[in-house]
């Protein structure tokens, strides 16, 4: 267990992507047995892919460079050009992947509203296009869990199961952007395999809460992964001695998953303190995992000034970019394995100092 307990020079709460590899990860990178993975000869990558598939209850896995590549390889593998994909309206795939579903997969989105990331299964079913030559064909349904822009909300298992069931009944694949699926599983008290049961593909990241420097994995059926492997090659994502970056991911699966609850606890402490401060609109009960998003509105200070004031006190935070027209200014704060309890206390003190009336 690799909780690092230094009061940091800087407390970096911009994202859980900022974590540095632990000493155990560095050791594993140095000692990794490697081979040419495009030739199917890297034993460390193969071990990681098998472990990841097993965790998700899937047949096979595929190691890729990033969460974005994971999602895009899945979208391209599931769909054909000109199709439509049903997606939650604030999803990462829709807003933060540089328009790739249009540029690479050639599919158009059918965005649906949600309650904190959970789309109504009846809406999903109603959004499936009837057979009519005017319409695009519905080629994919996606669910993001945890939902980043909904403040790390964990989409409940029953909702996931109901949406997955719509896909199964209507013969439409369901992809899960599970960049933070372990955070979701821990918050909901279920195994990740239970949470994604019946989905066609699940992507999750090692370079977020799990603390790795790089990497994501796609899991699915053997047949799907064989096809995804070809698409990954088209993206330029075939990697050679990738065991050096797969090795820390194995360390992460073995030792970084159970500690995620600590990040959630830290986020709750922060949320309780933030909710008391003038200008902050936040219901701490909404903070289920390691992401806090709060509305910020004051006459005497805007979000940029809050960010600057926090930086002066050694705490890094980011505004959450506006993704819907006219929405309120929001700030995102993310806890992770490089943030200790002392760091949280320091951040709370800094927020109080900057926001005190
Ligand atoms: N999210 C990043 C930024 O892109 C916003 C962050 O700091 O949270 N799915 C989800 C739900 C994500 O949150 C992210 C990254 C990705 C996919 C993409 O992963 P990467 O950054 O590895 O391409």
Image (cartoon, rainbow, N blue to C red):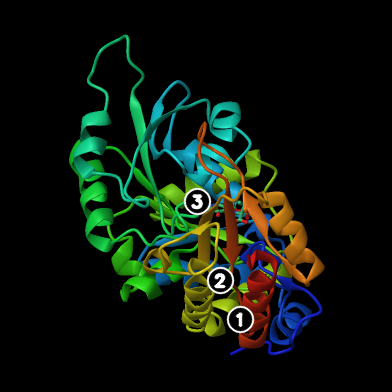
Query: Total label count?
Result: 3
In which quadrant will I find the C terminus? Answer: bottom right
Q: Residues within 10 Å of mark 1 (few under 14, many from 20)?
A: many
Relative to the observer, which residue lies in front, 89 or 236?
A: 89
Q: Hey, which residue is sitting farthest front in the picture?
A: 357
Q: Residue at x 32, y 76 (%)?
A: 189
Q: Which quadrant of the figure contains the N terminus?
A: bottom right
Q: Secondary structure at mark 2?
A: helix
- Queried on whether the Cβ of the residue with tag 2 lies below 8 angstroms from ligand 1, the answer reads no
Residue placed under numbered mark 3 in the picture: 149
Question: N-terminal of the two: label 2 or label 1?
Answer: 2
- The residue that disc 2 covers is 48
Indicate which disc, 3 or 1, sits on the residue closer to the N terminus: 3
Q: Is 296 in front, or is 108?
A: 296
In the image, which disc is placed on residue 307?
Answer: none
Please name the residue that numbered disc 1 is placed on.
Answer: 251
The residue at label 1 has a CB less than 8 Å from ligand 1: no
SS assignment at label 1: helix
Q: How far is the residue under mark 3 from the one under mark 1?
A: 28 Å
Q: Earlier in the sequence, mark 2 or mark 3?
A: 2
- Above or below residue 162? Residue 286 is below
Q: Position of residue 259 (x, y in %)?
A: 51, 83
Q: Is residue 305 left or right of residue 251?
A: right
Q: Position of residue 313 (x, y in %)?
A: 78, 72
């Amino acid at each position: 267990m690799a909780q690092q307990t230094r009061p940091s020079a800087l407390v970096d709460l911009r994202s859980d992507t900022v974590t540095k590899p632990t000493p155990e990860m560095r050791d594993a990178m140095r000692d990794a047995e490697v081979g040419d993975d495009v030739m199917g000869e890297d034993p460390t990558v193969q071990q990681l892919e098998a472990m990841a598939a097993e965790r998700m209850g899937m047949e096979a896995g595929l190691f890729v460079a990033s969460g974005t590549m994971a999602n895009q390889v899945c979208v391209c593998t599931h769909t054909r050009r000109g199709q439509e994909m049903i997606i939650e309206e604030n999803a990462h795939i829709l807003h933060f992947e540089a328009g790739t579903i249009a540029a690479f997969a050639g599919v158009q989105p059918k965005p649906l509203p949600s309650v904190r990331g959970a789309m109504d299964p009846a809406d999903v079913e109603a959004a499936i296009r009837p057979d009519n030559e005017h319409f695009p064909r519905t080629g994919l349904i996606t669910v993001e869990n945890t939902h980043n822009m909904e403040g790390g909300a964990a989409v409940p298992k029953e909702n996931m199961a109901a949406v997955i069931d719509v896909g199964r009944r209507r013969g439409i694949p369901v992809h899960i952007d599970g960049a933070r699926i372990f955070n979701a599983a821990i918050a909901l008290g279920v195994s990740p395999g239970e949470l994604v049961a019946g989905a066609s593909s699940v992507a999750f990241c090692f370079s977020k809460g799990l603390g790795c420097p790089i990497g994501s994995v796609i899991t699915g059926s053997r047949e799907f992964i064989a096809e995804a492997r070809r698409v990954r090659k088209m993206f330029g994502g075939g990697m050679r001695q990738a065991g050096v970056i797969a090795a820390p991911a194995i360390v992460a699966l073995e030792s970084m998953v159970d500690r995620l609850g600590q990040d959630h606890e830290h986020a709750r402490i922060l949320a309780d303190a933030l909710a008391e401060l003038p200008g902050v609109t936040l219901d701490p009960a909404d903070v289920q995992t390691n992401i806090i998003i709060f509305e910020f509105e004051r006459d005497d200070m805007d979000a940029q000034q809050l960010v600057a004031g926090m930086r002066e006190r050694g705490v890094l935070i980011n505004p959450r970019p506006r993704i819907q027209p006219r929405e309120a200014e929001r700030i995102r704060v993310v806890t992770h394995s490089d943030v200790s309890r002392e760091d949280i206390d320091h951040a709370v003190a800094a927020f109080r100092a900057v926001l005190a009336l």
